[in-house]
Amino acid sequence: MRIAEFQRHLASSAPSAALPPRPPEEEVFVPYVDLKNHGVNFTRIHLRRLAAKGLFPAPVMLSANRIAWKLSEIVAWKASRPRHESVAAGAATG
C-alpha cells in the first residue's frame, strides 16, 4: 500500500472505540521502551519518520529529555491499521 493510499485509508477510517476517551489528567503515557509491550516494534528513527509523515502519533515531550506517546493514540493507531486479507480470513475461519 502506497503512502498516499494509506493516508486516504486513515482519513476514511472511523475512530476506534477500543478505549473510552480519558480526561487529560488521567491520560496514560507510554515511553519508547514500553512500546513493544503495546505491539509497536519500530526503531526510534522509524517512529520519527512515520510521525513526520502523519502515519504514527507524534510523541509528547514530558520533560527536556523525555518523550512518550499517549496510550489512547497508540490504540487508535493500531485499530486503524489495514488488515491483510489472508490474516483476516485465517482469523475468521480458524
Image: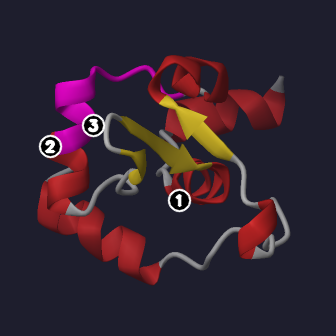
**Quarter location, residue 47:** top left
Residue, x 51% and y 41% (percent of image)?
85
Check contact, mark 2 vs mark 3: CB within 8 A.
Answer: yes
Is 11 left, or right, of 90 in this rendering? left
Residue 47 image label: 3
User: Disc 3 residue type?
Assistant: Leu
- SS at circle 3: helix
Residue bearing mark 1: 80
Label 3 crowd (10 A; few <14 / some 14-19 / many >=20): some
- SS at circle 1: helix
User: Disc 1 residue type?
Assistant: Ser
Across and down, in percent, residue 5 comes to: 21, 66
Across and down, in percent, residue 88 comes to: 64, 39
Q: Which residues are magenta?
A: 40-48
Residue bearing mark 2: 49
Residue, x 40% and y 56% (percent of image)?
57
Whether the magenta-drawn stretch holds residue 14 is answered as no
Whether the magenta-drawn stretch holds residue 42 is answered as yes
